Image (tube, rainbow, N blue to C red):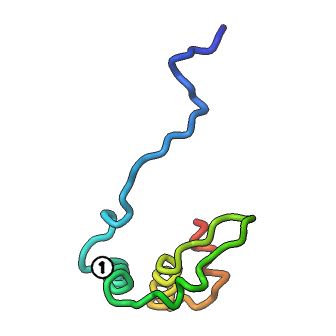
Amino acid sequence: MAPDPAHNYRQMTMLQISLEDQLMPGTLEWAIHALVERRVDTPIFDENYANDETGAPDYPPKILLKVVLLAYAQGLISSRYIEHLQRR
């Protein structure tokens, strides 16, 4: 039986989701996001935010700062454990 040309079951579908819209006002996650976006001066991080021509692109410094602040606020200080949670 020939494959149906109208359906490609192996195609990856990308959904456009605004992660910012997923944050509920009044939560710790929302407060950290708002703090970093509105109050933290990050140009000092931006100077070192670069990647050489090979490898995966760097994560933006603001995102990494949010991850670290949220983890520390929840008592998680092990960088390996934080990485493990991010992969999950």
Q: Provide residue 11's location: percent of width, then percent of height.
A: 57, 34
Secondary structure at badge 1 equals: loop
Q: Mark 1 points at which residue?
A: 27
Q: In which quarter of the image is residue 21?
A: bottom left
Residue lying farthest to the top in this orientation: 1
The foreground one among 80 and 69 is 69
Tell me: residue 79, above or below residue 20: below
Q: Provide residue 52's location: percent of width, then percent of height.
A: 71, 71
Q: What is the three-letter code of the residue carrying label 1?
A: Thr
Residue at left 24%, top 80%? 26
Residue at left 41%, top 90%? 41
Residue at left 58%, top 91%? 77
Check disc 1: other Cα within 10 Å, few if <14, some if 14-19, many if 20+.
few
Q: Provide residue 39's location: percent of width, then percent of height.
A: 33, 89
Q: Quadrant of the C terminus?
A: bottom right
The foreground one among 60 and 51 is 51
Left or right for 5, reference 53: left
The foreground one among 60 and 8 is 60
